[in-house]
Image (cartoon, rainbow, N blue to C red):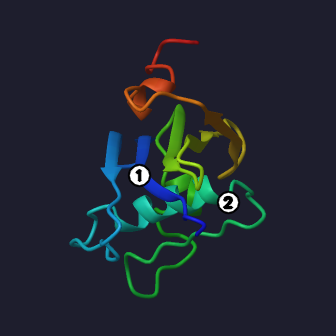
């Protein structure tokens, strides 16, 4: 019988509201809940962006307020990121029981209205002992 892969965790670094946060993903959890402004939309945007790292296919809008207009403070993906480099990383186990981390490196483009630079990546063959947040440079430190 062929086994399925699974998501182990989602790590957000420097996203709006999340400086460095890892969410463990359980097989039995199917709901994301919380009050207004808790980060549900930001978390799902980070998850989808790591899965589909193509800006032509990603369209996020502000759903925080009923009838939000284009003048609202949330400007799609751009509005979900903080200034500087941001990461969204999915730690997975594939059907061959190998650890694979897929993700994106994002950055707001200075001088361009709501533009975001996105670079996808995948890392294979990592030992389980390496925490996902340690795979990217710490803020202010180049690698």
Q: Residue at image x 51%, y 49%?
A: 93
Marks 2 and 1: in contact by CB < 8 Å?
no
Task: Look at the image and tell me whether residue 101 can be seen.
Answer: yes
Farthest bottom residue?
67
- Horizontally, is 67 left or right of 26 in the view? right
- Horizontally, is 17 left or right of 114 in the view? left
Q: Position of residue 19 (x, y in %)?
A: 34, 38
Farthest left residue?
35
Q: Is residue 131 above or below residue 119?
A: above
* Residue under pointer 2: 52
Q: Residue at image x 51%, y 45%?
A: 88
Q: Position of residue 83 (x, y in %)?
A: 50, 36
Q: Earlier in the sequence, mark 1 or mark 2?
A: 1
Mark 1 or 2: in front is 1
Farthest right residue?
56
Task: Look at the image and tell me whether residue 15 can be seen.
Answer: no
Considering the numbered disc 2 on the image, is that residue within a helix, a strand or a loop? loop
Q: Position of residue 31 (x, y in %)?
A: 32, 76
- Considering depth in this image, is 136 or 109 the residue closer to the camera? 136
* Residue under pointer 1: 8
Q: Is residue 49 above or below residue 107?
A: below
Q: Calculate the distance from the C-alpha at mark 1 to the C-alpha at mark 2.
A: 18 Å
Tally the marks. 2
Q: Residues within 10 Å of mark 2 (few under 14, many from 20)?
A: some
- Horizontally, is 142 left or right of 73 in the view? right
């Amino acid at each position: 019988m062929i086994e399925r892969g699974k998501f182990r965790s989602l790590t957000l670094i420097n996203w709006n509201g999340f400086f460095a946060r890892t969410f463990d993903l359980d097989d039995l959890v199917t709901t994301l809940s919380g009050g207004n402004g808790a980060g549900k939309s930001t978390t799902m945007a980070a998850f989808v962006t790591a899965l589909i790292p193509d800006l032509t296919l990603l369209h996020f809008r502000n759903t925080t307020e009923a009838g939000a207009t284009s003048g609202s403070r949330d400007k799609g993906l751009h509005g979900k990121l903080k200034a500087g480099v941001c990461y969204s990383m999915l730690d997975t186990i594939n059907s061959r029981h190998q650890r694979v981390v897929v993700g994106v490196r994002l950055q707001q483009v200075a001088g361009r209205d709501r533009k975001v630079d996105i670079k996808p990546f995948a890392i294979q063959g990592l030992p389980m002992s390496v925490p996902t947040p340690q795979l990217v440079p710490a803020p202010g430190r180049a690698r």
